[in-house]
Amino acid sequence: MSGFYLWGEHKENVIDSGGSINNYRFDYVEYGINSNLSIAYYIAPASTVISLGGRFQYFKTVFDEAIDVGSIPAASDPTYNSNAKNKFYGVTLTATYTFSI
């Protein structure tokens, strides 16, 4: 299991109902966990390990208040002051061949 903390910036151009283009910039942070659990089998004659398992990742994105560099204040649009929670999971299958140089 591992954890992470990331930060970044998102830029977006939005056309409002009047046809004006508004430029928004968002600062945000993301934090979460990664985990992987698997079983493995070593095939000695082939110098290969086969593993089967599962993977799970969860992270939350927290947006700072949007900065509007266009003509409409971003604070008036509630969709720009939101947070997101994401979950990813699935099955993993790997084959690792080992050799010496």
Image (spheres, grey):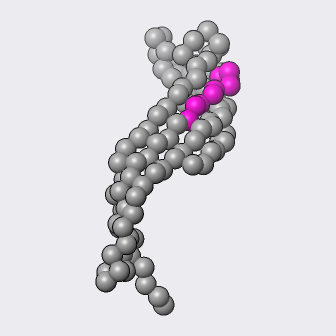
Name the quadrant containing residue 9: top right
Left/right placement of residue 64 relative to residue 45 reads right
Q: Position of residue 67 (x, y in %)?
A: 68, 23
- Give the tally of numbered discs: 0
Whether the magenta-drawn stretch holds residue 77 is answered as no
Instruction: Identify which residue is drawn at 46% across, 51% down.
Output: 37
Question: How far from the left and from the top, in percent, is residue 20?
Answer: 52, 17
Nearer to me, 13 or 56: 56
- Residue for point 33% across, 75% down: 43
- Locate residue 71 relative to residue 46 in the image: left or right: right
Quadrant of the image occupied by residue 25: top right
Q: Position of residue 42 (x, y in %)?
A: 37, 72
Question: Is 62 colored magenta in this rendering?
Answer: yes
Q: Is residue 64 left or right of residue 79?
A: right
| Residue shown at 31% from the left, 83% from the top | 45
Can the viewer see residue 9 in this picture? no
Figure quadrant of residue 82: top right
User: Toward the viewer: 40 or 18?
Assistant: 40
Dominant SS type (magenta): strand
Residue 96: tell me if it is visible. yes
Residue 13 x %, y %: 53, 28
Q: Which residues are magenta?
A: 59-67
Question: In front here: 59 or 1?
Answer: 1
Q: Looking at the picture, does residue 19 appear above or below residue 61?
A: above
Name the residue located 48 percent from the left edge and 90 percent from the top edge: 101
Asked if residue 47 is positioned above or below residue 14 in the image, the reply reads below
Residue 61's place in the image compared with 3, above or below, is above
Query: Which one is in front, 68 or 95?
Result: 95
